[in-house]
Every structure is written in structure tokens, then in C-alpha cells.
Image (tube, rainbow, N blue to C red):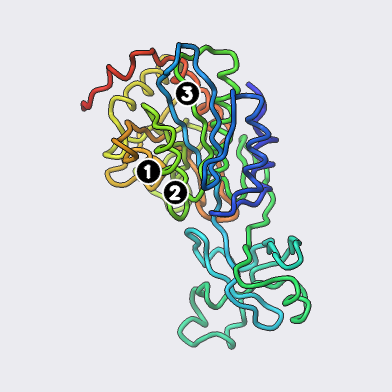
Amino acid sequence: MADILPFLKSLLSAPGLSAYETPVTRLIEEKWRPLVTQTRLSRIGSLEALKAGTTPTPRPALMVATHMDAIGLMVTALTGEFLHVTQIGGIDARILPSTPILVHASRSGEELPGVVVMPPARALPPSTADGVISLNDLLVDVGLSAAHLAEKVQIGDRVSFATQPVELAGEVISGHTLDNRASVAVLTVALEELQTKQHAWDVWAVATVQEEVTLGGAFTSAFGIRPQIAIAVDVTFAKGPGASDWQTFPLAKGPTLAMGPNMHPFIHKKLKEIADQLEIPTQLEMSPRHSGTDAYAMQVAAEGIPTMVIGIPLRYMHTPVEMVAIKDIQRAGRLIAEFAAALEPDFVEKIVWED
């Protein structure tokens, strides 16, 4: 199996906030182009890559979606030498002070390194001086004078995390945006595995946009492709400090297979059977409501699509130091490839809603 780490590190070093994914789109398209039959962009920017099946057309299609957008910040005001910001996607303000960032300065075309800073307690409202500082009270400092800052930056400019990916002991990697660039790596592993396998169905690998804010990429690509089956690959909560065993999943013990109203039980069953046959460890994840992933968008597209969610356990979600195990990425990628290769031409006719 090819080493996925260099590619994953490049993804973690690339910007690509929700609705502004172009920089990371270019990286993914370059990596996927030799592995697929064709690539294209949807009307709102999702990368859609087709690996054609071997049976006569029209062929059934499997769509695998992994969102490539990232959470981050946006400039709302310039106050002297400092920037005020708001969030793009879900951000917990508690983790922001002292975080290194990049300001994507539209007036100058530069990427300005900076840090998120917290005013001293005496400069804060009495109600927050000794507690958690709200995002409204945090500032971004890039080290420029007020005049030079105004020449380079304007309201609406994006701000992304700038922590560098770090390999840790135990074949674990930490960095920002592993939600969901880790899953882009999963789908890349799957496409590499499919180079040596025949598959009757068309396989659409889709790096979706705007999952963190609208699910727009999955809604529109699923509607346009109209696959017979869809799989969303996303991260899920890993066991970490203060996390109970029944709510989280250990790192390096395999991907999760979700069960709930957002997932089709027949597809879940087939994925589990293939994983067991190949001795790929998996973990059962119960999701009794909206899964919070692209799976919801794909499931309800057009007339409805049988959909499944594969999860990669991740610690410290929506922080600059997210953490995943490389083994879980490799196992999930292999499972998707084996599932795609095992789909018979008449598999759709066998799909039933059952316990």
C-alpha cells in the first residue's frame, strides 16, 4: 500500500475554507487525475472524479463523498493594528488564543502570518475578564502598523489555521483540518487500491465543498450524479481526555460503520460482511439522528439514495491539533475499494430495507 502521509501532509498545509476551497481542490485534482477516467468541477466547486466501471453502459454508480472544506475565520473589522474576526464553521473560541494563523490578504495578494491574541483582563468586560473570552473579544495581530494593515487587508478576508502537521508516536498524525482532509486521504487510498481491481460499477470520488456550513457540495453533486449508492467518509469522535467509552472510539482500532436513520441497513450489512471477510477491524457507531455529515444531503437527493457513513476516529475535533491514526485511514480506504469491487451489476435489485 502506497504511503499516504506525504499527500496528507500537503493537504493539511493547504488553505481551503468553506466556500473558498480552490487551493486544496488543485492539490486533490492533481493527485486523483492519474487514478481516474475523468475529473470535473461541479457548478459550486466540488471535485467530481469518475473511475469508470467495466460493464456496458449505462452502468450503476457508487458515489463516495469526502468534504475538503475547512473551518476558519473571517475578518469583520480593522481596529488600528488589529483585526476582529468571526467564525467560518464551528469554532470553539476557547482554543483560539495564541493560535498561529494566516490572513489571506485580498488587497495585497499576500498570506500574512499572525497570531490570535487575547486582550489583558483589565481591557475586557467585567463579565468575561476572568472567564472564557468570546470570539468578539479576541483579536488577530499580524505585526503591521494600522496604515500598512489597511493597505493589505479588508473586511471579508479569510483567516486559516497555520499549525504544521506533526507525526507523533504510534503512527498518529496531528494537525488542523484533519476534519476532513483525513477522509480525502481515505478516498485517495481507495482509488489507489482500485488500480489493481476490476469493478463493474462506476465509482465517483467526490471532494465536496461547504460541508461545514451548508452541505451544499453533497446536495448538488448527488443530485447531478444520481448514484445508486452513496457513502460519506468523515471523522468521528475518538477516545480522549474526559470522553466516555460509550460516546467515543479508540484510535487505530479501525473505522466506524454508522447505524441509524441516515444510513441504509443493507449497505451497512454488506460493508460489515466485507470487512469481516478481509479481517479489517471496524467499530459500530450509533447515530440516531441527522449524522451531521454529507450523508444526509446524499440520502435525500432526488428520489432518495441508499447511503452509508464510514467514520475515522479523531481527537480534538475542530481545533488546530486534531489527531488521527494512519492505520484507520488505510483500513477505511481498503474497505471502500473492496466494497466497490464486490458490487455485482444487479446489486441494486437486492437492496432491501431490513433490520
Which mark is in front, 3 or 2? 2
Viewport quadrant of the N terminus: top right
Measuring from the top left, give residue 10's x and y in whole percent.
69, 42
Label 1 and label 3: CA atoms lie apart by 23 Å
Q: Which mark is residue 346?
A: none
What residue is at 27 percent from the left and 17 percent from the top?
Answer: 350
Measuring from the top left, give residue 17's x and y in whole percent.
58, 54
Question: Label 3 sits on what residue type?
Answer: Leu
Question: Label 2 sits on what residue type?
Answer: Gly
Q: Return the residue at label 1.
A: 297
Q: Return the residue at label 3.
A: 335
Label 3 Cα crowd, 10 Å radius (few <14 / some 14-19 / many 20+):
many
Name which quarter of the figure residue 270 lies in. top left
Specify the farthest residue to the left. 354
Which sits earlier in the primary sequence, circle 1 or circle 3?
1
What residue is at 42 percent from the left and 28 percent from the top?
Answer: 282
